[in-house]
Amino acid sequence: MKILVIGENSAIPQRLYSELAQHATVDWLIDSDDTKNLTDKGFNKIYAHPLTPNQRKYYRRLYRGWGIIAVAQWWSYKASKIVDKDYDAIVAIISSPYILPLVCGSRLSKQLNCKLAVYTVDAIPGPGGWASRSWYHKQLRVMKKYLPSAHYLAAASRQMLQFQLTTFKHKEGLRSNVLHTPSTNESYQLPIAQENIFLFTGSIYGMRSPINLFKAFQMLLKEKPDTRIVFVGEMLYLDSMKKILTEEECKQIDIEPYTSNLEPYYRQAKVLLDIDANLDEDPFLSSKITNYIKANRIILCETGRKTPSREIFAGYKTIIQCDHSVDSIYNGMIQALELAATEQDYSEREPLIEMFSTPHVCSILWNDLQEICSTTQQ
């Protein structure tokens, strides 16, 4: 089987690509002209950005401002001129800020008479206030126009898949499945942390807010004044933090630039923090928590009532879940520190680690691709 993957030059496509390449011939069309690091790693045929350097200066700006469909069609037309003509399937990996592969995949699937599989790692368009009204309707228009051409749809959680199936009129007998975001390949067996440090990695934006965490942290400092929070990544709530916390309390929060080398931060932390959107039925599952589970650290997850986190991590002693209220977060922080002070059996997470492993996720995708390619429906 010969497969064309269309996606960003990012971790998720790379992980899936490397696993799929063990089963089939896999090429990759990426939104980048920096492919040297990929060919050095043994990737097969890599199609770089189909636009010229001058065109690339403007297309991202036009993509949001002028119209997704027109710019994506332009990009797709250029891409259709450079790719091979004999693929059995196209896998379009899309996210909320990057749905161009869907437009391109739809065009190439029809042009090359091959199957189209779409893997959405975000709910698109983001429900519940994740996207502005204008961007929401632009994205919805793309999904309604191009997703009906898909022969297969996968999403990163059960709730996300259920939501995504409501955004378009799909083919009768459309195959769909849950493909959890594959976790990093690294595992961390760390020594016991000595300081009371809570760690959050990644960006806080949109519907994810640390405001109630700040208030709960202020309560915690009265009882455990040596406690600290470390944010590694982009945190857009500095003004809110300074309004809630005193100058001295703010000194107990460190904000570091994001790095891919998180082990030193995992090593010093006692508790790893995850913050979901303040929505009871948010369909998103944070990718950071799928990496957190591979470190022998207590996890505290602030989440809504009917979220993927509530469903997947229920019953795990080393993963504490709390709602978005200040009291619940405070109680969760106290419980997390108490658990972190005693020896825990982190082997309970082994089923989770397997479920989010790249080989397991890719095995589901590969089996589904074989099935859709064995049928004659187009």
Image (cartoon, helix red, strand yellow):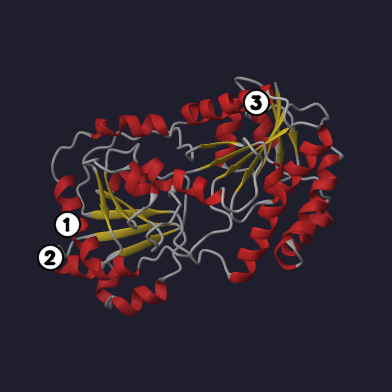
Name which residue lies at 21% across and 52% down: 195
Name the residue carrying label 2.
223
Q: Could one spot residue 263 in this view of the protein?
A: no
Residue sitting nearer the eye, 295 or 72 = 72
| Residue 296 % position (x, y) | 27, 38
Label 1: which secondary element: helix
Q: Gap in Å between the C-alphas at discs 1 and 3?
A: 47 Å
Q: Residue furthest right?
A: 81
| Residue 26 % position (x, y) | 68, 27
Q: Gap in Å between the C-alphas at discs 1 and 2?
A: 10 Å
**Type of amino acid under label 1:** Ile
**Type of amino acid under label 3:** Gly
Name the residue carrying label 3.
42
**Type of amino acid under label 2:** Glu
Q: Gap in Å between the C-alphas at discs 2 and 3?
A: 54 Å
| Residue 109 % position (x, y) | 77, 37
Label 2: which secondary element: helix
Residue 334 has which mark? 1
